[in-house]
Structure formats: C-alpha cells, structure tokens
Image: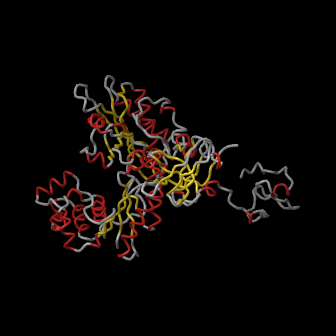
Amino acid sequence: MNRDQVPGASLLPAERLFSGLPPPCIPLPGYPLLASPVPAGFPSPAADFVEARLSLDEHLIEHREATFFVRVAGHSMTGFGIWDGDLLVVDRAIEAADRRIVIAVVAGEFTVKQFCRLPEGILLRANGPGHGDILIGPEQELIVWGVVRYSIHAV
Amino acid sequence: MALALVDGNNFYVSCERVFDPGLEGRPVVVLSNNDGMAVARSAEVRALGVKMGTPWFQMKDLARRHGIVALSSNYPLYADMSDRMMAVLSQFSPDQEVYSIDECFLGLDGFARRDLVAYAQAMRRRVRQWVGIPVCVGIAETKTLAKLANHCAKKHLAGADGVCDFGRLGEAELSRLFSTIAVGEVWGVGRRLSEQLAGRGIATVEALRRADAKTLRREFSVVLERTAMELNGTPCLELAEAVPNKQQIISSRSFGRYVHELGPLGEAIASYIAIAAEKLRSQGSLAGMVQVYIRTNPHKADSPQYQRSLTIPLSLASDDTLRLTQAALWGLKRIYRPGFAYQKAGIALLNLCAAGSVQRDLFAKARDNTRLMVAMDRINGIWGRGTLRSAAEGVTKDWAMKRERMSPAYTTKWSELPRVS
C-alpha cells in the first residue's frame, strides 16, 4: 500500500464499508494516523454471507465428461420450443426415457426428436410444420446419441 | 496388486465416428501432420492390408477403389475426447496414470479378484456411453503384463468381449498363450531389439519370460531384465503419481510447401518457440539452451540437400518467449543458406531447470518480462492459443502444415458444433 495515498479518503466511513476497499482507519486525537490498513480492523458485515457467484456451467451441466453441445438446423421441433439455430445441451450419461427429447442417429445422420415407447417399437416424434415421425421397429437398430437437457437461444 | 491397462480402439478414428456416425462400418484412415501418412486405421482399412505409416499418396488408388475416407488429424478434438475418457476412467480408481492420449493404467488395489472382469466391463460400458469411445481392458499383476493382456483382449487372443484378465488363466494356459505371441509385442521391445532377440533364439513372449534375467542384463540392458521380470509377475515399474517434467521440449513441423526465404522460416521458428515456451512456463521450468534446426527434404533425391542445427546457450536461463525467440532467430540467421528448398524446421528447449533455482546475473541488462508472460498466458488461456503472439511469428503463416481433410472442431469451437435437424 502506497504511503502517499489512502484510497477512499474522501468517502464517509459508512460508505467505505461497502465500497470493496479495506476497512477505514479512524484517527484518534493525539495518536499518529496509520496510512495502511490494520487487518484486525472493522470486519465487513457481509463477510459471513459471501457465496460463490452463480455459474451457468454448474446449473446446466450435470455430467461434465458426457455433455456435448450441438446446433439445431431446421424447424422440426418448434412445437417443443426448440428453434432453428438453438444451442442444445446434450448429456450422453442419461438413459433415454419415454417422452424425453433425444439426439438419435438415423441413417448415419443426427436428428433431434422426442423418444416415445410404443408397443410397436420406438417412435421418434417430430413436432413442427411438415415434419414426420420415424418409427423404429423392434428388429431395427436405434442409436440414441444423447438426451437433450436444455435448449438455448437469444431473445 | 492387480492393475488394468485401458486403451481406446482405433482412437482417432473412433473420435471421428462419434461426431459423424455415417463413418461407422466404413473404411477410415486418419492422416499424420501434413496429410503425410496413415496414423490411424479403422478395422476395415486394416482388413485391406494397409499398414500403419503407409504414405497417403501410395494409398490414393486403393482409397478410391474401396471408398476409404481419409481425414486429417484433428488434434483439438482428440485431446478433448481423451480428457473426457480419462476423467470417466478416473471414477473407477483413485490410482490412475495417463500414459498416452488413449491409454491409462488404473491401480485395482482393494478390489476382489473375482469381480475384476465385471468391473472392467462396467468401465467399457461407461466410456462407450458417456464419451462414445470403444475401449479394451487388460488386467494383470504388472504393467508389462497388463499391456500384453490388453493386446490379447483387443486381438481376441484371450479373454472375451474386450476384457482379458491374466489372473483368470492358469500357469499352463499362460505358457501356451505366450508361446503363440511374438516377442515384439512386449512393451519396450521394438523391431531392432526383437531382431536381436530372435538371433539368440528368443522369438516368443514365453521364451523371453523363461530367459535368464542376469544374462539378459549382461547381453542387453537392465531395462530388458526388468521387462522379463515384469513378464514373470514381479512389478518393477511403479504407477506414477504425476507426469514427470519434460527434460527438453521440442517443437517442430514439416511445411505444407517448400520454403526458400529467411522471413517465413523465421516466422515458423518464432511460432514453435511460442508453443514450446508456453509448455515451459506451465511446468514451471526455465530453459538454459535453445536449439534450432532446418532441413531440406531428404527424399527428394534430385534437389540439393542441406541440414544444419545450432545450439545457443543462454547467459541466463529463461522462460520468456521474447528472449527465447531472439536467441532462436539469431541462431537461424547463422545456419540459414539461400538457394535451398526447406521442408522442415524445429526448435528444442534444453537444459531445463526449475524456475526458482536460477541465480540472477548481476550484469544482466535484459528486461524482466515475467509480468508480460503471465498476462500473455492468461489471455491466450481464455481466448485461445496465439491470440497474443510476438510479431516475429508472422500473421498469415502460409508455411503452416497442410490439413486439407480436417473435420470440424466439434467440441472446442462454437462455430463448428455438430448440426442436428
């Protein structure tokens, strides 16, 4: 701390408490003014309540190693609130369950659809203008690439 | 104490297939730096008889006839997928040693022997599901044996479903198995050594296992003696806790096109120094010497050949990119000769020492760039390598290596994410 400057010298002591600056030094009559802060001075009342800032990563990602991002192309799922150009947070560690939105591989291509268990097999349901469903019979192979957890777009 | 060696099957190819499922079942090769030669082959390509390291230009005809898909190495992708795979595997044991981009050892202390195969299958399933990479697991008492067990699992020589536990085989079965495996498959036995061993009648793993340890030490090396002891179940290699710091850092590439002028050579050298210096700082070391070298293409018989290297000692060991670049460029100017078609250049940082251990030079006039380096590393760490670089590195870099068939950076660039419709 530079001995020539005492930051916040122009602030009222009360203002200094919440300014992020070190605690104020209050000069007592007849005693020399300390130019540098004393660590054992007045503590910030907020100190006990400091918490970590909110992290989107922590909120959106459960299995870090198994989470991937993909980009939506097209309008096949607008009925589910998934729009063209959206960013999808996909988790490979979650099992596909009935009615979940998944990324599946059909004919070597990625597709985003709703996974529906039916007696006849698995239906990959679309929900957008002019887009059809895909029924995968019990003998056919279905590869679920991952389960979509969040869809993100700017407003 | 049992341990496992887990490694990815055709790792680079497998990484590409995760993001392009249309490649499943098709013959795929991944090419080395500069699209030079095959460094990863899918099972279908192996079945066509293509060997590891086959130059791409030799394969082009075969590729066209069989529809082989060739891809340039996508290192950012492979590095990220490796990271994920190793993180998943670390869930299975607190003792993990990551050995290479696609292999790691796991200590299996404390696990009941009978459950190990089931445990290994759980590892395979989780890596396959979470990351998409198929792996094989070899389990044994020593690292050398675990590597061999992994080889057996992969090639279906022993074990089942990608897992092989030597602890499940009796002594007689192991002997029979090892008699059918060539000694060159043992970890640490390269081509030359296996030829020498064959000359002494040791052609199989079993023969090496039965050989007299003291004789091996005398006639070959203590390393081979330890290998033989490991084959016999005596662990000699510890599971390393942390990766030991490198004793030298090398950075070099072949050029995408021949370079004749000093200017572009200097840019390349400066770029390699920047990469190496970043590694140097991240491991907390300083370099005492800088080596620089350049060469023409030795395979181009009709062109004049020239290759030269120079080692420049520094008066004071340094980790400062600017100081190291200065030294390297000074060296380059001394070894450069006009009139040659340079194909490759490189640098090495030598005589590494720990950052705290160097005595300051009373007469040094050099500016201390520590804070500049710290800021540079921080910014490059957030915005990507090369965001801030020395002007000596050049801006357009048209000597950079050819990677014409690279797949997108699926997991490391927002603009290159996989698309779903």
Residue B195 place in picture, x, y as percent? 15, 53
Q: Is residue B392 above or below residue A118?
A: above
Is B82 placed left or right of A149 in the picture? left
Q: Which sits in the foreground, A74 or A131?
A: A131
Residue B143 place in picture, x, y as percent? 31, 65
Q: Which sits in the foreground, B204 or B386?
A: B204
Quarter holding residue B368: top right
Is B398 placed left or right of B172 in the picture? right
Figure label count? 0
Q: Which sits in the foreground, B358 or B125?
A: B125
Q: Which sits in the foreground, A125 or B153?
A: A125
Residue B170 place in picture, x, y as percent? 23, 74
Q: Is residue B233 above or below residue B278?
A: below
Q: Which residue is the extreme one toward the top?
A: B339
Residue B186: tell me if it is visible. Answer: yes
Q: Is residue B185 above or below residue B266?
A: below
Quadrant position of the C terminus of chain A in the picture: top right
Residue B389 place in picture, x, y as percent? 52, 37
